[in-house]
Amino acid sequence: MQLTLRKLEIFEKIAATSSVTRAGEELLLTQSAVSMALSQIEQLSPTPLFERSGKKLLLNDSGRLLLKDARDILQAVRRLEQQLQGESGELVGELLVGGSTTIGNYLLPALLGSFARQFPKTRVELRVGNTLQVAEWLESGELDIAFVEGPCHSRRLVANHWRDDELVVVAGPHHSWAVEKHATLEMLAAAPWIIREQGSGTREIFEDAMEKAGVKYTIALEFGHTEAIKNGVAAGLGVSCLSRAAVHRELEHGELVEVESSLLLRRSLSLLKRRDTSYSALLSAFLEVAGAQ
């Protein structure tokens, strides 16, 4: 039985989604076709590659070992395809791009749309997580490039400035702060804060600003998604500190109110790459559209 690139691609997608059904949906294959490919791959292995936990498929040690080699092979083939297609003058291929939460949800979608219109025979897959998760995905080879809003602490990755961003303190329209639209350090210390989870770049910038201002604060709620935080603040459950890019619509429509403070909340958004990354024609074209060249 032959191990093909398509089977490796299916195996990689099952590992990423922990599901035969979801892998099929993302690869546009039937569930039976994905299951058959997985069965054929496992027949070549002396041990199972996944542990079955309900409907989830979780990689075991054998599976993780195979996944690393499979990703290396698939990435090498993608780079070769991109190089060959770049030489022919027409860009065709697939990029795997990561974005930390604010960038991935509020900045990259428009860039992906612009890139798709310019290069209709290409495909860009966007994966969104917090800064720590995205850096780990890039380091492990699951992404070609990444954009993050938080500091990068990995020595295997290189961070270059992409663009500037500003965080703003926000409150609900019926909050007491919404009248004067200004908060002293004492008010910041007394407020119930709704903030992002550990590993979030937004949280790290906020914590650093509060520490530099000498403010000890109280966390009322912690959410892993910006939309949940915005809804909580609008409902009066607390105040928050988020990227202006993430809240500009709510500020325009009066659903949230910007509150001035003395906190230093400007930050640099970064382009992350592995130290050994060489730019293909496709990746170079994408970075040019993104204004990162």
Image (cartoon, rainbow, N blue to C red):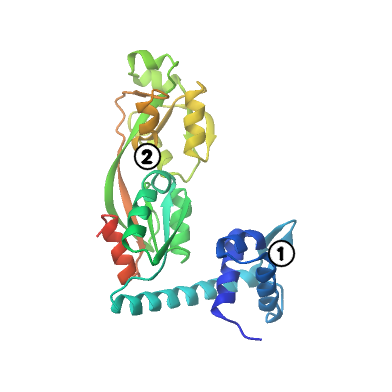
* Picture layout, residue 166 above or below residue 119: above
The answer to whether any part of residue 166 appears in the image is yes
In the picture, the disc for residue 51 is: 1
- Quarter of the figure with the C terminus: bottom left
Q: Residues within 10 Å of mark 1 (few under 14, many from 20)?
A: few
Q: Nearer the viewer, residue 283 or 212?
A: 283
Residue 112: give its label.
none
Element marked by disc 1: strand
Q: Compare residues 153 and 94 and report the one nearer the observer.
A: 94
Q: Nearer the viewer, residue 269 or 27?
A: 27
Tell me the amino acid under the disc marked 1.
Answer: Glu
- Position of residue 153 relative to residue 262, above or below, is below
Q: x and y percent of residue 160 in the render?
A: 28, 56
The residue positioned 57% from the left and 68% from the top of the image is: 12
Q: Which residue is mark 2?
A: 205
2 relative to 194, above or below? below
C-alpha gap between disc 1 and disc 2: 39 Å
Residue 282, located in which quarter of the rendered image?
bottom left
